[in-house]
Amino acid sequence: MVLHSQAGNSDLNCQISKHFPMAENYTTKSNGQMSVQDAQVVVVMVPLPAQGHLNQLLHLSRLITSYNIPVHYVGATTHIRQAKFRVHGFDPLTAKNLHFHEFPTPPFENAPPNPNASHKFPNHFMPLLYATIHHREPVCSLVRQLLGANHRRVIVIYDSLMTWVVQDVPTIPNAECYRFNSISAFYMHSSNWEARGKPFEAETEIFEDIPSIEDSPEGDEMRKRAAELSIAVKQSVLDGGGNSVEMDSFIAHITR
């Protein structure tokens, strides 16, 4: 998990497992996780208003609240309702320390998608993105309000495609921004490859060398490796697993 930090005029690319040292301003909860001793630190979550993005930051909000850190999840009324309705694994309405803020968004026209467009970018989505600029001031107002409520630091975690909404936050004393990269590494590599003019092409023989998943020794080996990977992923989210350790480290960093 990679976050990009902005505090004042400084920029820092932070990979949690490597760059967030452990701190000592937390206590251990009964289930083995760490929790902040008080609510001196609070988090504001700024998601992109699209389901795959809303859902990721809502689940991240749940993880952060498990450390007794209040999280304020912001967005338009429609999208917050969508995120609450579609989430799986927990009930956001009963989650402790999870607060929702519905910001007004002016009406806008949204053209239907064109399946025959020569370029597959979802241009019909652009009016919605333009409308989110109206959340710029409400986000700053919320940050200032939270700082005025005896919180010593406000952490703003925003979707990498919502930079324009939080652009003023780094100028606020005791406020820090962290960019959440919600796009897969494969998509980022593919987009960079296309932006560079596709400097190389995959040759046919490359695809011919991909082993078949049909009944064969190669297919059996692939299925075995997939099962092992599944177990490793499940173990990583348990206490003491890789993801758990990285999350503990990130929480220690923001509550330092």
Image (cartoon, helix red, strand yellow):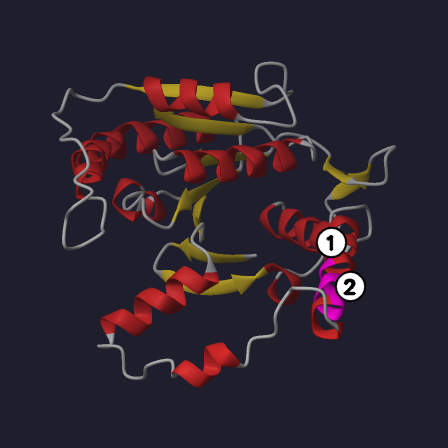
The residue carrying mark 2 is 224
Residue stretch rendered in magenta on the structure: 220-226
Give the main secondary structure of the magenta stretch: helix
Residue type pointed to by label 2:
Lys
Q: In the rendering, at what x and y percent does residue 45 appear? A: 45, 35
| 92 or 51: nearer the viewer | 51
Residue extending farthest to the top is 94
Q: Nearer the viewer, mark 2 or mark 1?
A: 2
Callout 1: few (<14), some (14-19), or many (20+) C-alpha neighbours within 10 Å? few
Q: Residue at x 42, y 17 (%)?
A: 81
Residue 107 x %, y %:
15, 20
**Vertical position of residue 56 compared to residue 211: above or below:** above
Cβ atoms at labels 2 and 1 below 8 Å apart: no
Q: Nearer the viewer, residue 113 or 52?
A: 113
Q: Residue at x 82, y 52 (%)?
A: 240
* Residue that appears at 75% across and 42% down: 26
164 part of magenta stretch: no
* Vertical placement of residue 180 versus 60, above or below: below
Q: Is residue 68 left or right of residue 41?
A: right
As shown in the figure, which amino acid type bears the numbered disc 1? Ser
Q: Secondary structure at mark 2?
A: helix
Q: Nearer the viewer, residue 35 or 64?
A: 64
* x, y percent for residue 84: 49, 20
Q: In this view, which residue lies farthest toward the front?
A: 215
Q: Which mark is residue 230?
A: 1
Q: Is residue 221 magenta?
A: yes
